[in-house]
Amino acid sequence: MTNTLEIHAAPPSFRTMRWIGAAFLALGVICIFNVATTDLDALWKTPLGVILAVPVLIGVMLGWVGLTETHMRRRLALLTPEGAQVGVHGMIPWSHIVRVERRGSGTYETLTLFPSGKRELRRPIPVGRAETSPDMIVGEVLALIENAGLTVTHAPKEQTIGQRDVWEVSGAPEPAPAKPGHVPA
């Protein structure tokens, strides 16, 4: 197990990108050729030429990205011994997590971290779109929670809904008692 784990989105299909780029390029060239054979001045004197250049430019761009196989690595989550930072949300400590759910399948598979606070947002990690396998990510998350001194138990089948895997997290310290006269939100 590593100390930190960065979960990145898997790259797109470059073969599909090349085919779509070729289709746009062909469509643009056919349209320009059709207009050029009927009215050559319309390409230069009307906005039609600019409009017909758009599919050609999209085709060249997609074809280039598909051929060079360049893409941006998008970080989906950062898992550290202190907590999890998912998407654009702030770091949530492992002690605030009370439940972990794995649901969906294929590219729609997610691992959702449920915090203890009622007003805190749950944090879904789209593990089906990750470069690493979803099973490995789930194992790392559960190991990091256990290394934080918390207990992770697999929920009984009666509590699971459908094909979801649910883990309950316990052992978190109780929040400090409210000060006298303080009204909780």
Image: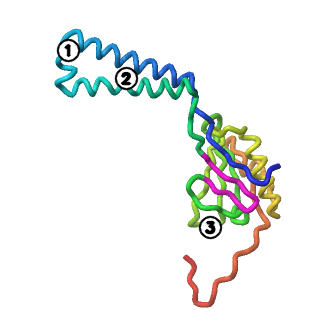
Question: Is 181 on the left-hand or right-hand side of 142?
Answer: left
* Magenta segment, prevailing SS (helix, strand or loop): strand
Front one among 84 and 71: 71
- Badge nearest the viewer, 1 or 3: 1
Question: Residues in magenta?
Answer: 75-86
Query: Callout 1: helix, strand or loop?
Result: helix
Task: Report which residue position mark 1 lands on.
Answer: 40
Q: Is residue 161 visible?
A: no
Q: Earlier in the sequence, mark 2 or mark 1?
A: 1
- Badge nearest the viewer, 3 or 2: 2
| Furthest residue toward top | 37
| Label 1 packing within 10 angstroms: few (<14), some (14-19), many (20+) | some
Front one among 8 and 109: 8
Q: Amino acid at mark 2?
A: Val
Query: Callout 3: helix, strand or loop?
Result: loop
> Residue 16: x percent and y percent?
54, 23
Q: Is residue 79 above or below residue 35?
A: below
**Residue at horizontal 66 percent and vertical 55 percent from the top:** 113
| Label 2 packing within 10 angstroms: few (<14), some (14-19), many (20+) | many
Task: Report which residue position mark 2 lands on.
Answer: 56
Q: Is residue 1 above or below residue 22?
A: below
Q: Earlier in the sequence, mark 1 or mark 3?
A: 1
From mark 3 to mark 2, how far is it between C-alphas? 52 Å
Image quarter in which the C terminus is found: bottom right
> Residue 90: x percent and y percent?
60, 61
Front one among 155 and 68: 68
**Residue at horizontal 72 percent and vertical 38 percent from the top:** 133
| Residues tagged 3 and 2 counted as in contact (Cβ below 8 A) | no
Q: Is residue 151 visible?
A: yes
**Residue at horizontal 78 percent and vertical 47 percent from the top:** 139
Task: Report which residue position mark 3 lands on.
Answer: 117
Question: Is 34 on the left-hand or right-hand side of 97?
Answer: left
